[in-house]
Image (cartoon, rainbow, N blue to C red):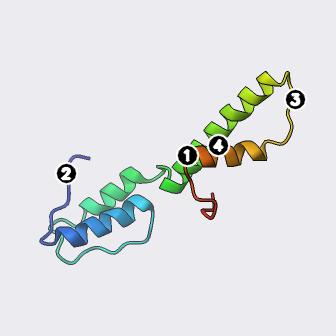
Amino acid sequence: MNRLPKTRSGKTLRGTMKKIADGNPWTMPATIDDPAVLPEIAAALQGRPTKLEELRNRVRNLAFAIWERRVQESGGDFKDASSDWFAARDQLAIPQDLLL
């Protein structure tokens, strides 16, 4: 980014930028000096994984590592990989009620 937005209310701007970063719908604050800046930020962030996608990828990568280690130690016995997914969630301290 070549420039950052300016506004009288930092609190409003922080909320708007959080919505942009999280991929949620947002509206242009009335107090912003240059309205073109926020769409530029949104465009720069487009295609970036959401926090949930990043967390899902971390769990997937760790579960694969757990599975790979288990298969190597057991001499090629693949078994059910779903237990590895739950083990990865536990290692990363992700609540079981959080749907990934």
Q: Which is nearer the N-term, disc 2 or disc 3?
A: 2
Q: Residue type at mark 2?
A: Arg
- The residue at the point 46 percent across, 49 percent down is 48
Q: Residue type at mark 3?
A: Asp
Q: Determine whether the residue tagged by mark 4 lies in a helix, strand or loop.
A: helix
- The residue at the point 78 percent across, 23 percent down is 73
Q: Which is nearer the N-term, disc 1 or disc 3?
A: 3
Q: Position of 70 compared to 96: left or right? A: right
Which residue has dot 1 on it? 92
Q: CA distance from mark 1 to mark 4?
A: 11 Å
Residue 30, image x and y in percent? Answer: 21, 78
2 vs 3, front mark: 3
Q: CA distance from mark 3 to mark 4?
A: 20 Å
Q: Of the numbered discs in the image, which one, if any, rests on residue 9?
A: none
Residue 64, image x and y in percent? Answer: 69, 35
Which residue has dot 4 on it? 60
Q: Residue type at mark 4?
A: Arg
Which residue has dot 2 on it? 3
Which residue has dot 3 on it? 77
Q: Which is nearer the N-term, disc 1 or disc 4?
A: 4
Q: Position of 44 compared to 88: left or right? A: left
Q: CA distance from mark 2 to mark 1?
A: 36 Å
Which residue is at the far bottom?
Answer: 30
4 vs 2, front mark: 4
Is there CB contact under 8 Å for labels 2 and 3? no
Is there CB contact under 8 Å for labels 1 and 4? no
1 vs 4, front mark: 1
2 vs 1, front mark: 1
